[in-house]
Amino acid sequence: MDSFFLPEEKIGEFTEHLSRFGKVYRYEQSSSGARLRLLSEDDYGKYSFPEIRAAEPAKFLFIKAKRKLAEYFDSSWKTIAIEEEPKVIIGLKGCDLAAIKIWDNVFRDDEDYKDPFYISARENTLLVGADCTSAGENCFCNLLGNKPFPAEGEFDLSISPVDGGYVVFIGSERGKKALDGFSMQNASQEHLKQIENRRNEILKALEEQNSKYKTSTPYRELVEKNPESPAWAKHGETCVSCAACTYVCPTCFCFQIYDKPGPDGKYERFLVLDSCKYPRFSFMAGGLNPRGRLVERFKHRYNHKFFHYHWRYEQYACTGCGRCIENCMGKIDMRETLKDIEKQEQSHKQ
Amino acid sequence: MPEKVENIYYPLPAKVTEIIDETPTIKTYRFEMEKPFTFRAGQFVQLTVPGIGEAPFTPSSKPGTSPELEITILKTGRVTDYLHEKVKVGDTLGIRGPFGKGYPLEKMKGHEVLVVGGGVGLAPLRSCLYSLFENIDDYKRVSIKYGARTPKDLVFTYQHEDWAKMPKTDLKLTIDNPYPGWSGTVGVVTVLLDRENGFDVDVNDAYVVSCGPEIMLKFVTYKLLDIGFKPEQIYLSMNRRMSCGVGMCHRCNVGPYYLCKDGPDMCYAKIKDYPNVFG
Ligand SMILES: Cc1cc2nc3c(=O)[nH]c(=O)nc-3n(C[C@H](O)[C@H](O)[C@H](O)COP(=O)(O)OP(=O)(O)OC[C@H]3O[C@@H](n4cnc5c(N)ncnc54)[C@H](O)[C@@H]3O)c2cc1C
Ligand code: SF4
Ligand code: SF4
Ligand code: FES
């Protein structure tokens, strides 16, 4: 992979160059943690590199919390060529990039149906990844097979801090094109070594902090085979159905279609993000609700991520970013729940 | 310019050309679309009441390709109340679809078919019946068992006689409780699966398709298993809250299956071990 050295003082120019592709969003460190910011020109040169992923996932730039799907009956909405405003997102961590594949499977790569809005947002967004420079206490990407740095094939460009600046990796043709005319020197062997060492260090830190949560049975099997485990009620007990977990989760995208009268005798259709944590999520006409009980809803989120999604796409719909752990009102830790299911299973077998 | 792609969320206009009162709470709506619409028996559509919302329904008319389409609808909530109370002949509603896989008609060829319906559940099954009747030579026999609360709650009564006259076909009805003037079978639909009530379907050869309220599906399934059917022979029209219809909103699952994509008719063998199959 081609790699170049970007001196610290040229970050403004680099960002300015990328802004030719589209509006620039950048993850930046603030006093209250990392934040995703839409930059104005004045901000390009002021960059405070976040150590780990931000509280906000990038999902709202792809699967908006609310978006218009159609005006009807207006046949110009029947087929559409949405030209989503081009964007650049700088600073997507390994787990942020891993989430994109999970959306792609559902909204872009399905054989039968394609979501034109998602596809347009996806095609018009330049993905600039970034390494993690520490291991967050709630991070468990390593347990989901993800890495604390951008994985090959998942980004257009990526940046890794080194002494005196950053190494820029070129991940795609599109990434290469976006840097056309921006000159940089090749990265040195020392730079690359520095990056490799840090990556190994952080991986090791993640492995250490998560070793107590590691299960010997894969998550799919644990969740699929143990619908009756007492661990569900035990860990779900403090859940208050606030839906904070699904809101911050990069891979929770369940939605609801909503219609209302619009202007000029037309009607409008919107997509609004929903949450399986809300009691009415699966409420059916006539009053039946297969997930009316809290524990069923609690279990469902794990089922969706580790069983149902895996059954269909052979990968987990969880990146291990730990956002749901950090933001849970009930102090529920997904890693503990999963570990406990295994413990209960083992004690049952004995 | 990016190329134009289909907007899967856009409803096509469908004009109401006739409304048939089936029962005090069920009406059949006939629609005319601008262009011919194609669906297989058991596939469903999302019906839009403009500005009010969408709800999933399986057309009750003859599968195939036609600008005409019929949907039989029970009044039971927000969208369906509006349909029953406000929608008139001449109004334009919207249709998205068809979605889902539909009934396993090919698989049932060469076998007996047992059709078990309850209440408005006969609506989706009627589209299946039309397909079976069209190729009746391909099937050994078609046995229809249909139950409703009272004689007034039976749908498509104006067609029952014609169905009973179809070759290799028989139709048996039941109502839940005795009713003045009703001399037929009394009891929930499972009583029609009793030998005493003339049940003579070959349990080793038949495929079953069933549609009705969740509670009925549950007792029909248990009864079928009890009298010797295997889970592989039973197809249930499952019901879950839906929204997108295209496997994206991830709401309508039974186990790992999304009913909108993998159903809504599911082989019982596939779903039987998952929690809350019957709600
Ligand atoms: C595959 C399938 C086939 C079916 N076939 C039939 C059939 O042939 N005949 C029949 O009578 N019933 C059928 N049903 C059941 C039927 O779909 C429900 O009875 C119907 O959804 C009830 O809708 P309601 O709004 O009246 O009920 P409510 O309980 O009031 O509302 C629930 C539904 O309304 C929708 N909704 C509410 N507000 C809005 C809004 N603002 N915008 C958009 N949507 C909104 C929701 O998405 C939800 O699905 C079928 C169900 C399924 C899943
Ligand atoms: S954040 Fe915690 S309390 Fe809130 S819904 Fe999710 S699991 Fe329940
Ligand atoms: S489930 Fe939790 S850890 Fe997994 S991707 Fe969602 S927020 Fe991150
Ligand atoms: S209705 Fe949205 S996934 Fe089935």
Image (cartoon, coloured by chain):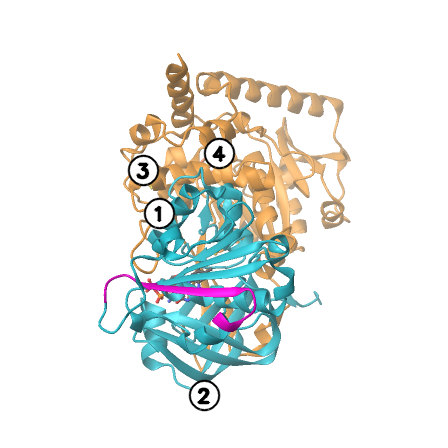
Chain colours: A orange, B cyan
- Amino acid at the residue labelled 1: Pro
Q: Is residue A277 visible?
A: yes
Dividing the image into 4 quarters, which one contains the N terminus of chain B? bottom right
Task: Judge by depth and name the residue closer to the eye, A349 or A238.
Answer: A349
Q: Residues within 10 Å of mark 1 (few under 14, many from 20)?
A: many
Tag 4 residue: A321
Q: Residues within 10 Å of mark 4 (few under 14, many from 20)?
A: many
Give the chain of mark 2: B
Q: How far apart are the alpha carbons under marks 1 and 4?
A: 29 Å
Give the chain of mark 3: A
Q: Nearer the viewer, mark 2 or mark 3?
A: 2
Residue A327 position in % (x across, y down): 36, 37
Tag 2 residue: B90
Q: How far apart are the alpha carbons under marks 1 and 3?
A: 11 Å
- Amino acid at the residue labelled 2: Gly
Left or right: where B59 falls relative to A175 = left
- Evaluate whether label 1 is on the same chain as label 4: yes
- Evaluate whether label 2 is on the same chain as label 3: no
Q: Quadrant of residue A184?
A: top right
Q: How far apart are the alpha carbons under marks 2 and 3?
A: 47 Å
Is label 4 in a helix, a strand or a loop? loop
Q: Residues within 10 Å of mark 3 (few under 14, many from 20)?
A: some
Q: How far apart are the alpha carbons under marks 4 and 3?
A: 23 Å
Q: Label for residue A295?
A: 3
Tag 1 residue: A290
Give the chain of mark 4: A
- What residue is rendered at 69% in x and 38% in y? A153
- Amino acid at the residue labelled 3: Val
User: Which residue range is magenta in the image?
Assistant: B164-178
Image label count: 4
* Residue B177 part of the magenta-drawn span: yes
Q: Nearer the viewer, mark 4 or mark 2?
A: 2
